[in-house]
Each structure stands twice: as structure tokens, then as C-alpha cells.
Image (cartoon, grey):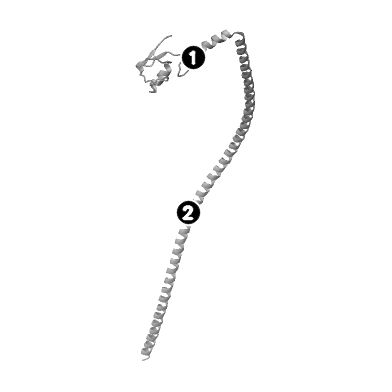
Amino acid sequence: EDEIVSLQTQKLKHNQTFTALNKSKDVFKLLSNQLQRQNDMQLEVIRQYNEHEKNINAQMNNYDREMISVSSSFDLHQQQIAEVLANQGDIEERLNGLTSRLSDLRELIKERSKVLEDVFYQRCRIEEESELLKRRLDAMARVENPTEMKLAKEREEYKTLLKCSSCHLRFKSHVLLRCMHTFCKECLDTRIETRQRKCPNCGDSFGSNDVKQFFF
């Protein structure tokens, strides 16, 4: 009986121990689940941080490339500004030289204009004196030799008769057979070429076959 009691006592202890172990197991399982959830949450946070860090690194790389591009553009603009300033100095120097040259040319033109005015004035005086002298000589010739003056006048009248009545420059050389008026060859050729085929004196029409050359 003592042994049975002892076995029952041990069984009771084992049952209590098993119950306690089961309770401990449940507690540990609950704790394990909580720790697993916490670990998963921490892993998610770490993953988000890693993703955020990756995005930040990508942005930093973009910023670095943009910074390099901006720096290159800035250096290029600085170089262009330096070139413009250098060219501006050259342009200002050339402009100053041209301004000085222009001033010299204006002064030279002013001097030459004054010289030309003096020359023009002297020429006018000489022409006036020459015309006055010519008039005096003509007057003296008329007084001293009226016969010669008469002959000269007649000579001018004959020359007028012999000159073309259209241009009054060249001598007559061709006749229009329709009206027998005479002109220089050049005036008649011009009228034929421009189809103005009418006599300048009487207006009678003529053709190229009506023009004939004559000799004095």
C-alpha cells in the first residue's frame, strides 16, 4: 500500500509537472510569437530604411551628376565672360583708334573743303575776269574790224544751216526722199530704231528706204 501511495504521489507530481510544462510551453510559444512579430516588424522597418537609404543614395548620385554639369556650365560661362571682357577691351581699343582716325579725317576734310572753297572762289574770279576780257576783246574787234565781224556772223549762220536741225550738234549728211528735209545720220538712225519714223520738221512718215546720204 505504501508503494501504491508512493506511485500515486509520483504520478500526481508528474501530472503537475506536465501541466506546469504545458503552461510554460504555451507561455514560451506566446512569447515566441510575439518575438517573431517584433522581429518581422523590425525587419520591415530595416527593409524600409534600406529602401529609403537606396533612394537617398540615388538622389545623391543625381545631385552629384547635376552638380558636375552645373559646375561645367559655370566654368564655361566664366570662360565665355572672360573672353567677352577680353574682346571688349580689344573692341574698345579699336573703337578709340577709329574715333581718333575719324576725328583726323573730319579735320582733314574740313581743311580740304576750305582749300576747295578757296580754289572755287579763285576759279570763279578767273572765269569772271576771262569773260570780262573776252567781252572787251570782242568789243574791240567789233570796233576795229566790222567787216571781219560780219564775216564771222555769216560763217556762224552758214554753220547753223549746215548743222542737223534735230540735235544742232552734228552736220547734215542724209536726206528724207519723201519731204527732202536733211538731218544727221545719228538722229535718223535713232528714230528708226525707236520706231519714231516721222520727220522732225514736217511730221511726214518715212521708212528706212527713204533715207539717203548726200554730199556737199
The N terminus: image quadrant: bottom left
Q: Amino acid at mark 1?
A: Thr
Image quarter in which the C terminus is found:
top left
Q: Residue at x 55, y 10 (%)?
A: 150
- For marks 1 and 2, the one nearer the N-term is 2
Mark pair 1, 2: CA separation = 102 Å
Residue 143 % position (x, y): 62, 10
Q: Residue at x 45, y 64 (%)?
A: 48
- In the picture of the structure, the residue carrying the numbered disc 1 is 160
| Disc 2, SS | helix
Considering every residue shown, the one lying at the far bottom of the view is: 1
Image x and y of residue 125, in percent: 64, 20
- Give the amino acid at mark 2: Asn
Identify the residue under disc 2: 62
Crowding near the residue tagged with mark 1, few <14, some 14–19, many ≥20 C-alpha atoms within 10 Å: some
- Nearest-to-viewer mark from 1 and 2: 1
Residue drawn at x 36%, y 89% is: 4
Location of residue 77 in the rendering, given as x and y in whole percent from the top left corner: 54, 45
